[in-house]
Image: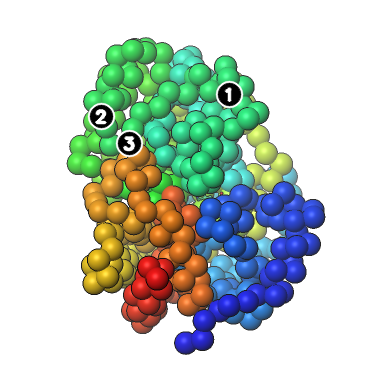
Amino acid sequence: MPLIEERPRSAEWFRRGRKVLPGGVNSPVRAFSAVGGEPFFTAEGAGARIRDVDGNEYLDYVLSWGPLILGHAHPAVVEAVREAASRGTSYGTPTPAEVELAELTRETFPSMERLRFVNSGTEATLAAVRLARGFTGRELLLKFEGCYHGHGDSFLVKAGSGVATFGLPNSPGVPAELSRLTLTAPFNDLEAVEEVFRAHAGRIAGVILEPVVGNSGLIPPVDGFLAGLRDITQRDGSLLIFDEVMTGFRVAAGGAQGRFAIRPDLTTLGKVIGGGLPVGAFGGRRDVMEMVAPEGPVYQAGTLSGNPLAMAAGLAQLRALRDAAPYAELERLGTRLVEGILAAGERLGVPLSGTALGSMWGVFFREGPVRNFAEAGEADIPLFRRFFHEMLRRGVFLAPSPFEAGFLSTAHCEQDIDETIDRAGHALRAALE
Ligand code: HOZ
């Protein structure tokens, strides 16, 4: 296949974009700064593929950073948005779709006895932490190194995703007083968590984590880690908060909490539940959620929260997922993909490791197992960068960072996977030259 070498139209849009948008983008990870080069500008997407403004086509494993589990422009989602938009884009009053989406979400996430919709995953985690603090009357928060919970002040401490990608230990603009309230521990290290709780007994409002980390690459929890956190938090009276913005409806229908049978006190969702429109949700134990205004004193609000277009898209996507029950097949494809890439590495003498969980997958450029952020950081990042570009030249779009997970959609078929494996073999060889 001909390699994609130039993107003159994308380059021109990027030149214009940089004059009006910081870095030419509206979210840092899109700028390709971590891998070098310039981003392509997308014109359209369909199924498992997107096309840039120069007419190049890419098999897409980013999928808008997770939301598009049915692929791009799924007819049911597009039609639901079209139909909802024809009746108006926002009312600022309750609508039936909000109740329906909440009911459908709770069916799949029974721990979310009550929930509220917001506009993004960041909003959801901010609200969940405020609520945990309001409910417990405590101020400290424990998070894990390499977990990313959006760009709220309290979370920009040893965070994953873009924060890790750009090597920012934390962000200017976050008051030191606030950062001091965020404690950290390595993921998958229960002993470290016990130690933090020993040092701060009765003072930690909540423990927030991605139960399967997707923002340091893909890192599953080791046996007993999530159950251990459940025990420790219960014992101490602090709340266990699962940030399932990425894993919700992705590692299994019921997210990581369903898959690993752990019931957190609070959960945050986003991405998939909005079908590609801006949405987030936080919810959990009824007694905790009763603290949220107007029932209780913990304030949280939003002009566009529960937006009718986002609710319609989310409902269409979740209903299609419920009918299709695609997770076993997605995991089979993901496993095939990861194993194919690892085999290519083995043939070329490149140490790789990786895993697939539901519709998420990831490969590290180092031997496994990778159990935490520090180990993820020991991968061969320069080789990843070259691999990323060689894949892009071959029409495969991976996340432009070693600290992100890959995604699959129901639109990806076995032939796509096999083509990707084939291209990965060539890309790896080229990356080594
Ligand atoms: N939460 C997304 C995945 N790490 C990041 C997407 C973004 O920052 O734009």
Residue 194 lies left or right of residue 170; in this view the side is left
Lower position in the chain sequence, tag 2 or tag 1: 2
Name the residue: 65% across, 28% down: 173
Query: Does the rendering let one see residue 185?
Result: yes
Q: Marks 2 and 3, how far apart in space?
A: 8 Å
Label 3 Cα neighbours within 10 Å, binned few <14 / some 14-19 / many ≥20: many
Q: Where's residue 202, x and y in %?
A: 37, 12
- The Cα atoms of the two marked residues, 2 and 1, are separated by 31 Å
Residue that carries the numbered disc 2 in the rendered image = 190
State the residue at coordinates (51%, 33%).
169
Q: Where's residue 141, x and y in %?
A: 45, 23
Could you say which is closer to the camera, residue 256 or residue 6?
6
> Which residue is labeled 1 in the image?
298
- Per the image, label 1 sits on a secondary structure element best described as loop
Task: Report which quarter residue 233 is drawn in.
Answer: top left
Tell me the kind of residue under disc 3. Answer: Phe
Q: Residue furthest bottom?
A: 1
- Percent of width and height locating residue 270: 51, 49
Foreground: disc 1 or disc 3? 3
* Of 252 and 194, the residue lying toward us: 194
Viewport quadrant of the C terminus: bottom left
Local crowd at mark 1 within 10 Å, few (<14), some, or many (≥20)?
A: some
Badges 2 and 3: C-beta atoms under 8 Å apart?
Answer: no
